[in-house]
Amino acid sequence: MTILRSTRIAPVAFAAMLCAPALAFAQTTTAPTTTTRPSTATTAPAQTKDIQARVEQHITQLHAQLKITPQQEDEWKKFADVMRGNARDMEGVIEERTQQYPSMNALQNMQSYQKVAQTHADHLEKLTSAFETLYDALPQPQKQLADQVFKARIKAQPQHASSTSGHGRAE
């Protein structure tokens, strides 16, 4: 039987939340029979700080890669704020799942996974809308640069092409 390991969800969900397809964060693993699951008290705060740091690092990196000008800062700030808000919101959903996971039955596991996936979809919709406004404000050479940056990110993600086969189950 495979289970969705809650200790691995947050970092993967974070990466997916920023620019990967929705199914990329739904990885499953086989639970080891000889190890115990770390307590949520020690993993959730560390994951939260890690996610926040990664979001800020990603925002800084994208700002530089896209060569955002002072005239574009207002639209950039709106986009970056959506990224930050999405990360904070997802942290709450992941933390809730992590805390409830040990006592979940199969149906509750599936419902909890659905909530994570729906939250991700809602976040992606907000992020896309904010990025569309920014992208529309970019001159053509900068749009081409953005196209290259996002294509390179997708190609660099392991298992991107195979993420839909065998993953995404919450068994």
Image (cartoon, rainbow, N blue to C red):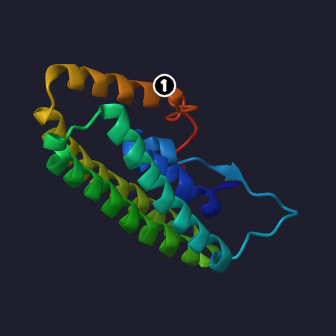
Residue at 37% x, 33% y is 65
Query: Height in image: 126 above or below 115?
Result: above
State the SS at label 1.
helix
**Quarter of the figure with the C terminus:** bottom right
28 horizontally vs 30: left or right:
left
**Quarter of the figure with the N terminus:** bottom right
Query: Height in image: 53 above or below 76?
Result: below
- Disc count in the image? 1
Q: Residues within 10 Å of mark 1 (few under 14, many from 20)?
A: few
In the picture as drawn, the residue positioned furthest to the front comes out as: 70
Q: Does any portion of residue 148 appear in the rendered image?
A: yes
Q: Position of residue 163 (x, y in %)?
A: 52, 35
Q: Position of residue 147 (x, y in %)?
A: 30, 24
Q: Position of residue 69 (x, y in %)?
A: 21, 38
In the picture as drawn, the residue positioned furthest to the right comes out as: 34
Residue at 57% x, 31% y is 159
Quadrant of the image occupied by residue 37: bottom right
Q: Choose between 76 and 97: the one closer to the eye.
A: 76
Q: Amino acid at mark 1?
A: Lys
Query: Height in image: 26 above or below 132?
Result: below
Residue at 55% x, 77% y is 100
Q: Choose between 24 and 128: the one closer to the eye.
A: 128
Check disc 1 and report the residue beneath it: 155
Q: Does any portion of residue 129 appear in the rendered image?
A: no
Q: Choose between 98 and 169: the one closer to the eye.
A: 98
Q: Position of residue 114 (x, y in %)?
A: 41, 59
Query: Height in image: 78 above or below 133?
Result: below
Residue at 63% x, 76% y is 40
Quadrant of the image occupied by residue 136: top left
